[in-house]
Amino acid sequence: MKYKITETSKIVKGVVLYQIIANETFGGVQAGELGGWVESERNLSQEGTCWISDNAQVSDNARVSDNARVSDNARVSDKARVSDNARVYDNARASGNARASGNARASGNDQISGNDQISGNDHVYDGD
């Protein structure tokens, strides 16, 4: 197992989130490095080099997999998926059935929601 869920928790909008910690070194993440926040292990795959860092949060049935990264203050929730080499960062939000895949990037204050899909080399940025 590349990471485990710690006992450190916080409540966000009535949902208990737990901080993760890397068990091994992979993809630029060092063993012992604290990560972001998940509701449960279903939110972050144990496969690949995917990672949630900083104050990023992934909850509900959302999933981060493959080599994807969620960082900074980003939030991924509902049934959203972040996969392949996609990145969701800054204050970006992914929710509903949104999908970020390929080399896609969502950053700034961007929100992808509903059935939105960004893929390939798409970069969605809302700096407002």
Image (tube, helix red, strand yellow):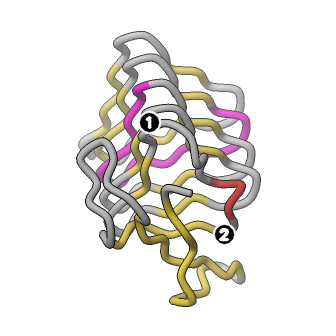
Residue at x 50%, y 69% (from the top left corner): 37
Highlighted magenta segment, given as a residue range: 85-98
Between 11 and 52, the one lying in front of the other is: 52
Tell me the quarter of the picture where residue 86 sits.
top left
- Residue highlighted by disc 2: 39
Q: Is residue 67 left or right of residue 25?
A: right
Q: Residues within 10 Å of mark 2 (few under 14, many from 20)?
A: many
Q: Are marks 1 and 2 in contact (CB under 8 Å)?
A: no
Q: Position of residue 6 (x, y in %)?
A: 53, 82
Tell me the quarter of the picture where residue 113 sits.
top right
Q: Residues within 10 Å of mark 1 (few under 14, many from 20)?
A: many
Q: Position of residue 68 (x, y in %)?
A: 44, 36
Between 93 and 127, the one lying in front of the other is: 93
Q: Considering only vertical position in the picture, is 71 above or below 10? A: above
Q: Position of residue 89 (x, y in %)?
A: 34, 47
Disc ID at residue 68: 1
Does the magenta-highlighted stretch encompass residue 79?
no
What amino acid is at disc 2? Glu
Disc ID at residue 7: none
Q: Position of residue 59 (x, y in %)?
A: 65, 61
What amino acid is at disc 1? Ala
